[in-house]
Amino acid sequence: MIKYIFKRFLYAIPILIGVNLLTFTLFFVVNSPDEVARLHLGNKRVTPEQIQSWNEERGYNNPLFYNQSEKGIKSFTKTIFYQKSFKLFIFEFGISDSGRDIKYDIKQRMWPSLAIALPSLLVGLLLNITFALFFVFFRSTYIDYVGVIFCVGLMSISSLFYIIGGQYLISKLLHLVPISGYAHGFEAIKFLVLPVIISVIYGIGSGTRWYRSLFLEEIEKDYVKTARSKGLSEFSVLFNHVFKNALIPILTGVVVILPLLFLGSLIVESFFGIPGLGSYTIDAIQSQDFAIVRAMVFLGTILYIFGLILTDISYTLVDPRVRLK
Amino acid sequence: MLNFFRNTLLISTVILASCSDKPLNSPYSDSEESKNTFYSSFQERPKHLDPVKSYSSNEYAFIAQIYEPLFQYHYLKKPYELIPLTASEMPEVHYLDKNFKKTTNKGNIRYSKYILKIKKNILYQNHPAFYKEKDDYIYHNLSKEELKKINTLKDFENDSTRELIADDYIYQIKRLSDSKNHSPISGVMKEYIYGFAEYKNKLNKIESSSKIERIDFIKSNDMLGVKKIDRYTFSIVLNKQYPQFIYWLAMPFFSPMPWEADLFYGQKSLQKKNITLNWFPVGTGPFRLIENNPNLRMVLERNKNFRGEVYPSIDDKLNERKFYSVNKINEVPFIDKAIYSLEKEQIPRWNKFLQGYYDNSGIASDNYDQAVSLNSSGDITLTKDLKDKGISLETATTASTYYIGFNMLDSIVGGDGKKAMLLRRAISIAVDYEEYISIFANGRGVVAHSPIPPGIFGYQDSEDYYNAAIFNYANKNIIKKSVEEAKKLLVMAGYSNGINQETGKPLVLYFEATGAGADTYAFLNWLRKQFKKINIQLVTRVTDYNRFQEKMINGTGQIFQWGWNADYPDPENFLFLLYSKNGKVKFGGENAANYSNKEFDKLFVNMKNMKNSKKREDIIKKMLEIVQHDSPWIWGYHPKSFSLSHRWVENIESNLMANNTLKYKKINNSIRKKDIKVWNKANFSLLYIVLFLITAFIASIFVMIRKKDKEKIYD
Amino acid sequence: MFTFLLTDIFFYIIIISLIMYVAYVRKTPDILANWLYVFRSRTGILSIVVLSFFIITAFLDSIHIKNKIYNNNTKQYVYTSEIKSFLDIILSPMHENYEKSYSAPFSSHLYSKETVNFNNIDKREYPRLLYKGNHNKYSNNKIENIAVISLFSIIKSFFICFLIYMIIFYRTIFKKNNNFLNAFNNNNVLCTSFFIIFFIIILLYDLSTQYYVLGTDKVGVDVLYKSIKSIRTGILIGTLTTIVMLPFAIFLGIFAGYIGGFVDDIIQYIYTTLNSIPSVLLIASAILMLQVYMANNPHEFENIYERADLRLFFLCMILGLTSWTGLCRLLRGESMKLKEVEYVQASQTFGLNKFSIIVRHIIPNIMHIVIITVVLDFSALVLAEAVLSYVNIGVDPTTYSWGNMINAARLEMSREPIVWWSIFSAFLFMFILVLFANLFSDVVRDAFDPRANKKYE
């Protein structure tokens, strides 16, 4: 087991290198840092001299891969590649183009993201599975048919509409929760209620349908028929057998996204003014803070790979029949 | 399902329980609301709070409350007038000849010398950087152990203060020259302050990036033109006669900076925790920044060490003791705390203002119609809805201008040739800024005739003083020339019906646009329509701001839109945008159109250092005539600023030059509490309906499951 | 003079391959059976009809011609760089004139008050619209007028549908002993949906000659026109994205699965790497870089249409890059399975070369996965466009797209009274397209997926 996990981690390294090279090409080979400097120095009275010293300070004036003017190990370390890309491997994200320490900001901002994403996931999961079981129970009836159509309808609405509509109705017309904002600690609840509700509703359509098809697949299997023939009620067949066995794909599906919850939701966070990593990324994209975008790409990749490994582990824990090679 | 039901019930009871006193939708905590607190919002997180770098109004909104330069604008007086802030009096100015001897002979003047005196007994805010134990600044060299406990500035156990002295101002001027600090005005000051350039070079030569060495150098080396006279007095020598320099002295760039703070924040280990001078200012002003979370909110709190200042009145005479003496009733600041929340999206910002959670709000163009109406005499007033809420409106024309520039280096629209000039003029006539203002700014603006906005010396506003190249005077009104006239000009320019008569090809022009705001599409669409009026096709190239800047610097753009916000209320600060020595391509200056005209340049140099007089006005008139003839810009418009405040906010005065106005604001908390409560009554009807539906739904499901389970008719 | 934008050409390719696919299906009984399942399903036929109207609109919008103007001096027509599509010509009553600013649906006045100088007295009032809304043709009462127009369009659409019905089913209708309505009874969903759609189209068209059915936007452009023009963008993003990347996905997937070994490792590595980057971030960084490239090479993109078009195309490519990996993985797995199937093994022993095995045996047997993926991705991509444009990393701001409309609606929603029609029409059009695409994909999946639970649908 430990050996397997170790192997998986080793396997992640070439992928991380690949991602790193890809982002490096995107951000430095295609684009020169000069304009970035100009953007961050403001728009009034910027002189070329200032741009140069800004670049020097951020280390953007170094050559890409090999520094001929330096000797020994320094000819490799005093390059953009080493300082901006290689250091990501040891989680040295450096300083953002606007001058703040990225690592510090990420540490601060991942909790609000989690505060939205985790409840949304849990409540959503609960609702989706309940609805799915409900539809499966009434399969081949009009309840199921209408339910599925309803889900398709919910799926066909852009997330933007849920957010704009929800904000307008709940906050503006009914005055039930603050329109936007965030507070730390217990007071955060009133700010989180609406975004969580909206994320849950947005996910119901596709989630319910997904779990419904999972259960339907399960219900065809022989053991279900056996259980039924033993005279168990349909309700207990569904709950004790179908649900229990479908738990593995459900669980693994959830585990893979768990680490990514830290990344937050781009749109929801920026609409509700929640200082999470999602709005951090959006801000970085809009202000073209490449240092942050690069760090977030790298972080996202790591979390994704971590999720995959977790999935594999959870397979063995849930189902002893699965052996890891 | 049962769980879900229980959850919703739980949540709703929590919600119902918590609505004891304040409205449910209040974004603030209980403890904050009851205090004498001012609430506002900021749209974009400020990039720099270091006075050496700050140069935009959203940054000034904070640092001007904290740092105090020598002078400030009188809050109530118009035209704008400078008065002392930390200075004890207005400066003495001497003119010197080439041997630094005082002279009154105008021909001999080479230098001018400002003698600046500051008040005694002004104290800085309490700050750990000042804290000494046994004559030793213990926080200036933090060990790893000590750092572990520190995450924010609040985590330092001790703090202290110090008196403001002349050295602090001198220190800041030296900091301006350090290219490591990226001060946007170091280029300008290099030209004016004697010895500045030399000092800059010296500093640049220090190889070491060690902060301590730089600070030591700055402390021990003097700038030639900036001298300390005594503890509270210093002098600045300028290379030239430059009367506008006093305006610079009122800007946050010339705030005092204690070297202790610079050294304290210079520690690399603190930078890792984002505790830097750029985020946590140290000043003498009425407020200090106690919370800086640019992702959420910034909180200013009253500085306990503030010396006190009296609310100004129009009758104040300069240098009269009365103004500065501390009078308990009118002592500013009036508020104890100011909370600024980050609000990036427009919808929440406006709604929160209407709900009373922000005390003031600028009006975005799209909210204008709701807020403002014109009464019969043409005055702008508020609509009934807002008036009923007791909201008040302040308007003022800003000292800024937005224009569309032609790149004078371009082969088609640029150059001194008559053909290009006629083309530019035709376009200028075709682009209807009157319409622009009504669509995009909802009437909040004045059509520009020249770069100089209203309220600035030299503004054109009479029947014999307007832009005759683009406008006509008829029926006691100044009216833009008609599109027909523009078409005629176009024929003269050789582009009859939009076709280049030499090549037979249609004329295509390119517009460089930046950004992709919500309005970009509409604006570009509108602009194309304007050019279409005279059959010119306009291709719009949308890029990000970086690329736009690059195009401007390389001179590869053709037509572009830009704006300028005045540094100080003087025509020089606008006309220099067309001075050839400021050309963007050649000199990297602010003349983005790269306009160059020898006659204009000569007049500009003359006008620049003059005091406002009839003679100066005549020169400005001549200069405007020249540029209006050449039309290097489509003279766009001067925006008007509207600001709305709730009825519980007192002492509202629109003063666009003064930034340190927070100290004058007054809040009536009891009215605010009452109003907010009335405006934000929670409406639970929907919640009840939803709860009812859920209950009904669950009940029916149970019934159905029971029924179906009994049937057992599967497969 | 016709002119072809990059995306036009790709759109034509899509249409042509669609036609070729239809011809291929007609000859292949297995696949035909699957498709017949789709056609027999009521939701299937309904969504096909609706989607085909969307596609026809997009197609009409993809045939571009250059504008020309008259040169007085040389007495000749000169082509300008301005481009019109067939759809623009058809819809010319909707966009030849612009109002000044916002006006509500069916309104006769602008939405906001303006200062009007009347006899030297400034008055604040709602100005009348210049071109539409005030010229009620049939009756002075607006509602009556609209009712009359609706009545006319019912009659018109009835006649058109009747004509089409006669043409399509003439054989069945005129057969002996056959009821005239037999064909209708057998195809009632088809016929009704045709009638309803024609009715809606004709009604909207007629109404929009006299009214702004969905109001006007900030600069006075008809919102209905904007929404219709956005169809092309939506359809293109939905289809082009997958089509562009399809060849790569298919071939790399099959190679990895079928050939295995070192090739498999490399291909796996590539798609795992791409897949590991969260897609939004990948798209964002790629679009940022694209903007940089376009700004660096302004001369390659002479006019506004080409610029916008190229950005749209690149957006499709980048979106394709992110969706490509999933399909590739599926195909790899499937072809690995197929490799072990008996008849493939048999052909191998007969000495058939690898290439022809892939063409003959593998590709036909993985096509169902491809079709399901293409159809499934479609709706997700249309929705993604809106979100990306909202974050300003989507299509060019000058391109008509629902995302841009929603983006602009941010400001409109904070007005009071709010301007709701822009966001409403974007919502409506997007919802209809995505809803029917989803329904369609459901049916297609049921038809093609061997594991699908057909029983319960």
Image (tube, coloured by chain):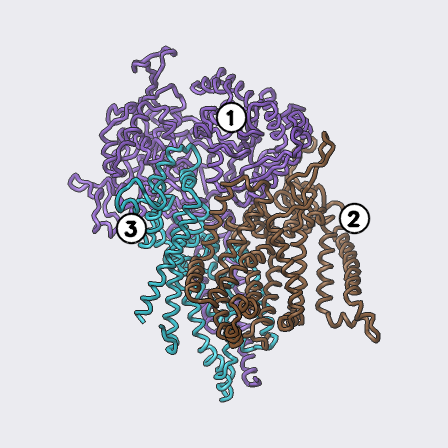
> B444 or B664, which lies in front?
B444
Q: Determine the secondary structure under disc 3.
A: loop
In the rendered structure, the colour chosen for chain C is brown
Supply the letter of whichever chain is cyan: A
Q: Earlier in the sequence, mark 3 or mark 1?
A: 3
Residue C429 in sight: yes
Between label 1 and label 2, give the one nearer the viewer: 1
- In the rendered structure, the residue with mark 1 lies on which chain? B
Amino acid beneath label 3? Asn
- In the rendered structure, the residue with mark 2 lies on which chain? C
Q: Determine the secondary structure under disc 1.
A: loop
**Which residue is tagged 3?**
B151
Q: Few, some or many C-alpha atoms within 10 Å of disc 2 (few <14, some 14-19, many ≥20)?
A: few
> Are both tags, 1 and 2, on one chain?
no
In the image: residue B108, left or right of residue B691: left
- Please tell me the numbered disc located at residue C137: 2
- Please tell me the numbered disc located at residue B595: 1
